Image (spheres, rainbow, N blue to C red):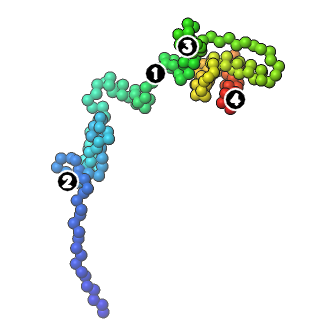
Amino acid sequence: MRRVVFEPVQIAEPEPPARLCNHPGCDGAGEYRAPRSRLELDNYLWFCLDHVRAYNAAWNYYAGMSEREIEADIRRDTVWQRPSWKLGQRHGPAYEARMRDHFGVYGENGGGGQRRHARSPGADASTRAASARDQALAVFDMEPPFTQTTLKARYKVLVKMHHPDAHGGDKAAEEKLKIINQAYTTLKASYFA
């Protein structure tokens, strides 16, 4: 018969928590973080589970703000805190290229004043390509030099203005959109190929 000998096992005392709960009078472990305030979202208080639940239940992000401030904050959040404006109130990235300067205040070309394109009935391919490029520039109302970004911005503006859906399916708008698309393809091929 075998004898079983039991040796006494020493139970280690639990280690104290790395962080204590920030709630007054609580000795629990602070395992759950919560922001200190609306203005200090990256600065945390550490709570045990029961106290973080109570803190979250009482949390009011808009505490101390007036109704106007709350409304303004909500509106800023709808555009991810980035500035915005009503459509048509501000100018896009290609505005300077389209600006009219009839008196020459802004320089020699005036940032794009009225352009007159001479039509030359050229028979060779280079003259026809130049003519197609000139027509495309006239459709886009632009003068070189321009960047691919400004060309694309102008294209988007023209598409929004002349899209058939914006004109109730008008056939004239559809034809204008076809011309804009062809001009965009021509300019991309001419300048950025």
Residue underneath mark 1: 85
Residue visible at 69% across and 20% down in the picture: 136
Residue underneath mark 4: 189
Real-space CA distance between mark 3 and mark 2, rounded to the nearest whole angstrom: 74 Å
Earlier residue among tags 4 and 2? 2
Real-space CA distance between mark 4 and mark 1, rounded to the nearest whole angstrom: 34 Å
Residue type at the position of mark 4: Ala
Quarter placement of the N terminus? bottom left
Residue underneath mark 2: 27
Residue type at the position of mark 2: Asp
- Visible residue check, residue 76: yes
Percent coordinates x, y for residue 11 in the rendering: 23, 71
Seen in the picture, residue 88 relative to 49 is either above or below; the reply is above
Percent coordinates x, y for residue 162 in the rendering: 63, 19
Location of residue 182 by image quarter = top right
Residue visible at 24% across and 75% down in the picture: 9
Residue visible at 19% across and 51% down in the picture: 26
User: In the displayed structure, does residue 12 sit left or right of residue 139?
Assistant: left
Secondary element at image label 1: loop
Tag 4–tag 2 contact (CB < 8 Å):
no
User: In the displayed structure, does residue 132 sit left or right of residue 77?
Assistant: right
Earlier residue among tags 4 and 3? 3
Location of residue 60 by image quarter = top left
- Visible residue check, residue 160: no
Residue type at the position of mark 1: Trp
Q: Which mark is residue 158?
A: none
Percent coordinates x, y for residue 29 in the rendering: 25, 54
